[in-house]
Image (cartoon, rainbow, N blue to C red):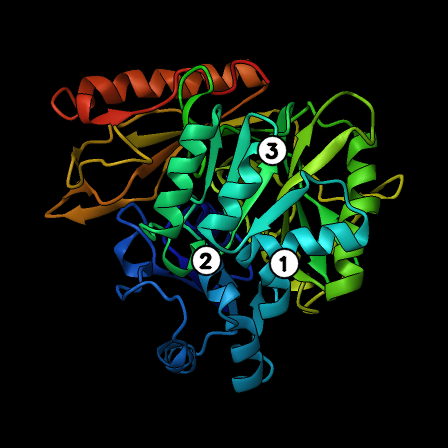
Amino acid sequence: MRILILGSGGREHALYLKIKASPHAEKVFVWPGNGLVPAADRVERAQIADSFGELKNFIQAENIAFTVVGNEAPLVHGVRDFLKTELPGHFVFGPDKLGAQLEGSKAFSDAFMAEAGIPHGTSFVATSLAEAKSALPSQTLPIVLKADGLAAGKGVSIHEDYASAEKKLEEIFEGRIFGDSGNRVLLQKFLKGTEASLFALCNGEDALLLPSARDYKRALTGDLGENTGGMGAYTPGDHLSEAQKIYTHEKIIAPVLKKFKYRGLLYVGLMIASERADDLAVVEFNCRFGDPETQSILPLIEGDLVEYLLWTDGGRADFPLIKAETAKLVPYRRGSVVNIVIAAAGYPGAFEKDIPLIFPEHKSKDLHVTGAGIREHQGSYLSTGGRIANVVAYGKDRATARALAYEYLAAFTAANPTSREKLYWREDIAQNT
Ligand code: GLY
């Protein structure tokens, strides 16, 4: 089968590696991919967001049977609906436009959770600066502000005081830093606890859970600094108990399946307040795999990822399901995977691009590097984004995986003496839960 993956980040690179290893994969393309994806498999064209004609032509010309949508923008703009209508029989991984609004509009998601009785950080939705400012004093600190629409992982900020929240609201409504995505802003109570990301493969009726992951959203070591798309992750996130997974399956994922006949990947971002099964709340839904969690989840999964992904679109059903009480889990091997993001210093604020990068050789079969904001340039590499690459290490336990990843970063530092000060990575990934 010829397979196309849409997207360019570490997540799509991880999907590429796992899909390429499947016996079903005759040829795999990544559109546009990144500089660490082999050039022969990259489709060197602009990233697809909302214009799908060129995509249809490529799929037909290359005789592609299955499109795996990695990133949210095409889904929110209806790429599944388009391909299913235009190319009958073509398999697509990802939800339809309505289901994707769970990520595409935080206000939509908030309203759905309220209606379905799903525990979440309740919000005030403001449609103007005046409305937001008048609601501000009645919110408890710290306050979370969320732009309603897509904002490339930058739409959420946490404020310890009213003045900084007010400044941010001015930037959003008057400065239009998020464009139309900031036409509405959610003011939310800050949820305390430990974050867990639980991913469910959904086929419209049923869900298969992947091992949970712990994402590190704050930019700086010690959980300081601004919120980012994610600075590292580890799997399994053993701070999420079986009882909590079952609760999440029954009370959170099942209502999504029922309401939206949801297909593809449902990302449930949770805040775990205590060990009690129901003492958790949804921080966010996303309509695609998480980044950087996917880089740590996929290397642990056993079985054929292509079959699991096809199952979401009615492609195949004859693969093993492991039933644990009511939660169905994709089988995964023992051990742990830790992923550390190499970022540009300053990310998610202003940062330099075109930082030269050298990736030293290593001998461990348990370690690999995936690209994100990086391009190939005359046989070497230059950064193109805030999150540049991911160091992904497997170990028999989390401490072993973590040590291997940081050992590689020490070698990477030695290989990049000039660029090092322009780069940043957290020193505490996978240290504590
Ligand atoms: N790691 C957070 C996200 O993928 O949105």
- Tell me the tag on residue 183: 2
> Which element type, helix, strand or loop, lies under badge 1?
helix
- Image quarter for residue 197? top right
Residue 369 in the image, given as x and y percentages of width and height: 36, 35
> How would you rate the neighbour count of disc 1 (Cα within 10 Å): few for under 14, some for 14-19, many for 20 or more?
some
Left or right? Give the position of 37 relative to 354. Answer: right
Q: Which residue is drawn at 63% across and 32% down?
A: 196
Indicate yes or no: mark 1 CB to ligand 1 under 8 Å.
no
Which of discs 1 and 3 lies nearer the camera? The answer is 3
In this view, the mark in front (2 or 1): 2
Label 2, label 1: how far apart the Cα atoms are? 13 Å
Q: Mark 3 points at which residue?
A: 139
- Pointers 3 and 2 in contact (CB under 8 A)? no
Q: Which amino acid does label 3 sit on?
A: Gln
Residue 349: image quadrant is: top left
Looking at the rendered structure, the secondary structure element under dot 2 is loop
Q: In which quarter of the image is residue 334?
A: top right
